[in-house]
Image: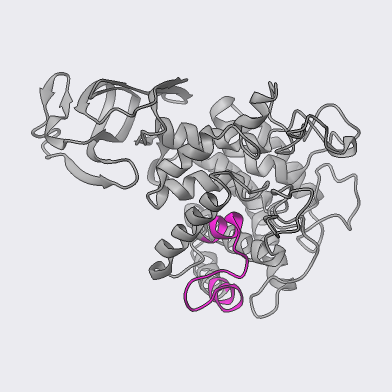
Amino acid sequence: MPTDCPQRDERLGWTGDAEVFSRTASFLRGVNSFFDKWMRDVAADQLPSGSVPHVVPNVLGDGASGSAGWADVATIVPWNMYLAYGDKKILDVQYPSMKAWVDYISSVSQDHLWNTGNHFGDWLFYHPDDDNDGSAAVTDKYLIAQCFYAHSTQLLIKAARVLGKTNDEKTYTELLQKIKKAFQREYLTASGRLVSGTQTAYVLALNFDMLPENLRAQAAKRLVDNIHRYGDHITTGFLGTPFISHVLTRFGYSDVAYQLLLQKTYPSWLYPVKMGATTIWERWDGIKPDGSFENPGMNSFNHYAYGAIGDWMYRKMVGLDTYEDGVGYKHSKIQPYIGGGFSAADASLDTYFGRLSNSWKLSADQLTMEVEIPVNTTATVYVPTTDPSSVKLGGQILENINGQAPQILDAPGTGGKFVKLNLGSGHYSFTSTFAVPTKKTAAK
């Protein structure tokens, strides 16, 4: 079972902690068998109503269940394992549990609005001790719940599609549209402002596509403005943190994602490091800037939830990802977003097909990118460049490859473009012209 922390009287299988870290975990270890076992435990402890306990094994009792972002482990983890390892058996085994959870939410919702029950919300969000100016990043718990209602429904739709359950796919697709309309009626103004103006509110609304397309760009700008208003600091808790950097990159603000990654003062990922941390903390300020400690009753210095930033570093900074049409890295996506003053980054992943890897290095105005694609797989590769005509493969200018001319795409927020190529297995060495950032740091 996953444990939230090893050192205090809890040591419980908290569902929320495991859910937010599950995708990152899939890069670090072969966790498919582990989660296959534990998700069966989740289904076994699921209440007859379909509600999912806060912890599994459920030692807290039937009353401790149904919190948004925690109970959604029933849908999120099976889908993450399917993406990472390509085995649809976990979807097949867990599908009744996934469906029961979504049906439970529907049963306690009113007009497709999940505004009932007790929720942890954006657990351990930024909250200064003396909040006279209202700077605490409090996000409406029911707004969060509605976002996860939509997300779990979307994942159920995807699972139904994979498993060939066409009637369920149709039924829950119609439900999803109603869920999103209910969200927009309740939490969105006509101009695109959310009733909670926090980073987490905008991150979840954007990540789960809760907003009409014509209002998404302005919402992303509101998110960035909020980040700048807090002095380029993150204020999200357990539920907003895993997605914030992905949302920033998706909407063309990779530079802001790098600002958050490299921020060294509280609250930030590097603040604990500057304070001597060697593991991820439960709280952004387990040790406060004045050297005092948070309440020892709940102050873990070994807690993996905020380590979910690793997922963005692997999938966006270095660029190793899998497409849904070829899960388990049968069809990989290799698309690094360069920024933050980094001069180099590399990562590798041992897939079932062999090693998938990418490394990039900047020197003067030249980018070198080394790609390894496993046997019996394909990859779509995006080479960053500020001059598409300069991109070379094995020292040769790209004119066509596999009978097709490379595509040139914009790369918002990076200062450059991408040259897109579809490749089979093998080792590939690319070079291109790319503007060298001022600050140089290596990451591995």
List x then y, in percent, for residue 35.
66, 36
Q: Classify 360 as above or below 197.
A: above
Q: Is residue 434 left or right of residue 396?
A: right
Magenta highlight range:
179-205
List x then y, in percent, for residue 328.
46, 35
Residue at 26% across, 33% down: 383
Q: Is residue 394 left or right of residue 197?
A: left
Q: Classify 406 as above or below 106.
A: above
Which quadrant is home to the N terminus?
top right
Report the front residue among 392 and 278. 278
Q: Number of callouts in the render? A: 0
Residue 216 visible, this orientation: yes
Residue at 72% across, 56% down: 121
Residue 355 visible, this orientation: no
Residue at 91% across, 33% down: 9
Quadrant of residue 291 within the rendered picture: top right
Residue at 74% across, 38% down: 283
List x then y, in percent, for residue 59.
90, 44
Q: Is residue 277 left or right of residue 424?
A: right
Q: Is residue 111 left or right of residue 185?
A: right
Report the front residue among 334 and 193. 193
Colouring used for the render: one colour
Q: Classify 114 as above or below 121.
A: below
List x then y, in percent, for residue 176.
54, 69
Residue 390 is inside the magenta segment = no
